[in-house]
Amino acid sequence: MSQLFTRRAALGGLALGSAGLLTGCDRLAANEDFRRLLFSAENFNKWAQRALTARDALAPEFRPDQVSPIFRSNGTRNPNTDAYKAFWRTGFDSWRLRVDGLVTRPLSLSLADLRAMPHREQITRHDCVEGWSAIARWRGVPLAHVLRAAGLRDSARFLVFHCADLMRADQPYYESIDRVDAFHPQTILAYALNDRPLPVANGAPLRLRVERQLGYKHAKYVLRVQAVDSLAGVYGGKGGFWEDYAGYEAYAGI
Ligand SMILES: Nc1nc2c(c(=O)[nH]1)N[C@H]1C(S)=C(S)[C@@H](COP(=O)(O)O)O[C@H]1N2
Ligand SMILES: [Mo]
């Protein structure tokens, strides 16, 4: 968490320091739309982070002896729906990951299919906005590999992750990321945590790890990856469950 706050502090400093810089853009800034776009908090953070670190920079990775003794669970700990219980009873044999939307080859992948694909392992720190962090080892398929297998179309700008847990009557948890994060080397669909099959509490059988982003972006219990050109038509339109209902930022870079 300390590093999270250091980064935030650095962004604050940059925001102050860049005031002089921005006056050089008077003509552009005179354009109302451009101003609104530039100074909306979310775009400003995004821009400031880009200025500090390249989007493809790696998140820090840790040594095995730095792994936290316990990786806690947060949010949904068990989706507990009939459909999920049925998957669980078969040891997730009947579970499938759908990959669809703006792809040329829609896929339906079993856990065995995913385990047979190239994998990546990484020991990273998870930062939750609720104020806790934990380091763990993750193993999974690079999302880039799955997207290439599905033939992601150029028109796809976002990937939406539909989850098995219902947060409200008919509203599942969902999240989304842009293409840059989708093809980031540390973005994986993880099926193992600390060398064991992903526990139910942490998103069994498959969850997203998107290591440059805050905890809530790491969708658990993923059933479907949908490629879209806009988030406007997806659920509340803001890119994720907490974005729709609690005003969390769709871009949660750390
Ligand atoms: N499907 C789903 N994914 C989710 C959540 C959730 O409630 N449901 N909570 C999010 C939040 S806020 C965090 S911090 C992490 C927690 O992951 P963990 O339970 O493995 O610690 O999952 C994220 N992904
Ligand atoms: Mo979180």
Image: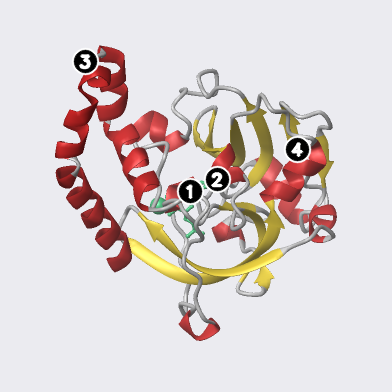
Q: Nearer the viewer, residue 234 or 59?
A: 59
Residue 244 visible in the shown view? yes
Q: Is mark 3 within 8 Å of ligand 2?
A: no
* Residue on which the image places disc 2: 181
**Label 1 vs label 2: CA separation?**
8 Å
Answer with mark 3 or mark 1, whichever residue precedes in sequence. Answer: 3
Residue 78 rendering spot, x and y as whole percentages:
56, 52
SS state under label 2: helix
The crowd level at tag 2 (other Cα within 10 Å; few <14, some 14-19, many 20+) is many
> Disc 3 marks which amino acid?
Ala
Q: Secondary structure at mark 3?
A: loop
Disc 3 designates what residue?
A: 30
From what the image shows, is residue 126 above or below residue 241?
A: below
Q: Which mark is residue 254?
A: none
Residue type marked 2: Asp
Q: Is residue 129 left or right of residue 24?
A: right
Q: Position of residue 214 (x, y in %)?
A: 41, 52
Looking at the picture, does residue 4 appear above or below residue 48? below
Rate crowding at label 4 as few (under 14), some (14 to 19) or many (20 or more) other CA atoms within 10 Å: some
CA gap between label 3 and label 2 equals 32 Å
Q: Which residue is mark 4?
A: 98
Q: Which residue is mark 1?
A: 55
Compared with 96, 247 (above or below) is above
- Identified at 46% across, 77% down, the residue is 68
Disc 4 + disc 3, Cβ < 8 Å: no
Q: CA distance from mark 1 to mark 4?
A: 27 Å
Left or right: where 234 falls relative to 254: right
Distance, label 3 to label 1, CA atoms, is 29 Å
Dot 3 crowding, Cα within 10 Å, few <14, some 14–19, many 20+: few
Do the residues under discs 1 and 2 have CB atoms within 8 angstroms? yes
Residue 2: where, in percent of width, then height?
28, 67
